[in-house]
Image (cartoon, grey):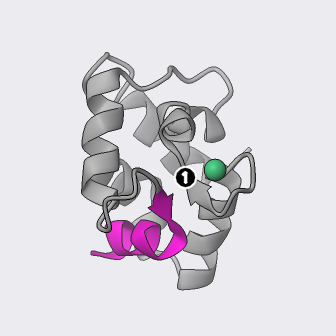
Amino acid sequence: MAFAGLNDADVAAALAACTAADSFNHKAFFAKVGLAGKSNDDVKKAFYVIDQDKSGFIEEDELKLFLQNFSASARALTDAETKAFLADGDKDGDGMIGVDEFAAMIKG
Ligand SMILES: [Ca+2]
């Protein structure tokens, strides 16, 4: 089930493009899944889904399971993918991604 106004077919296509280990690229995924073109409100909604423990930040363990927010049967990200994703989003270097950092990564 898609969330934040995403289209099921777009989600399926985005997931299908990164089934192989180390083939995930967050920028390509955000574009394919349609998040890049969503309103700031929808981007925030997506953030709060991915922030599973509702801490207000997306931590490394939540990033690792990022794809499973889109499909429960999706794979976990590899350590290399998780680190690249975190390094790109974490502009203030606190080791987590805040909602503003998340929006900047998607819209940027
Ligand atoms: Ca969190």
Seen from the viewer's position, the closer of residues 20 and 8 is 20
State the extent of the magenta-drawn residues as a range. Answer: 97-108
Magenta highlight: main SS: helix
Work out which residue is located at the far front of the displayed protein and give it.
94
Q: Vertical placement of 48 versus 22: above or below?
A: below
Is 97 on the left or on the right of 5, as rendered? left
Residue under numbered circle 1: 58
Residue 41 percent coordinates (x, y)? 62, 81
- The residue shown at (74%, 44%) is 1
- The residue shown at (74%, 47%) is 53
**Which SS class for mark 1?**
strand
- The residue shown at (46%, 76%) is 100
Residue 91 percent coordinates (x, y)? 29, 66
Three-letter residue code for mark 1: Ile
Residue 106 percent coordinates (x, y)? 37, 67
Q: Could you say which quadrant of the image residue 3 lies in?
A: bottom right
Seen from the viewer's position, the closer of residues 103 and 97 is 97
Label 1 crowd bin: few (<14), some (14–19), many (20+), radius 10 Å: many
Regarding residue 3, the answer to whether it shows in the image is: no
- The residue shown at (61%, 73%) is 44
- Does the numbered disc 1 mark a residue whose Cβ is under 8 Å from ligand 1? yes
Quadrant of the frame with the C terminus: bottom left
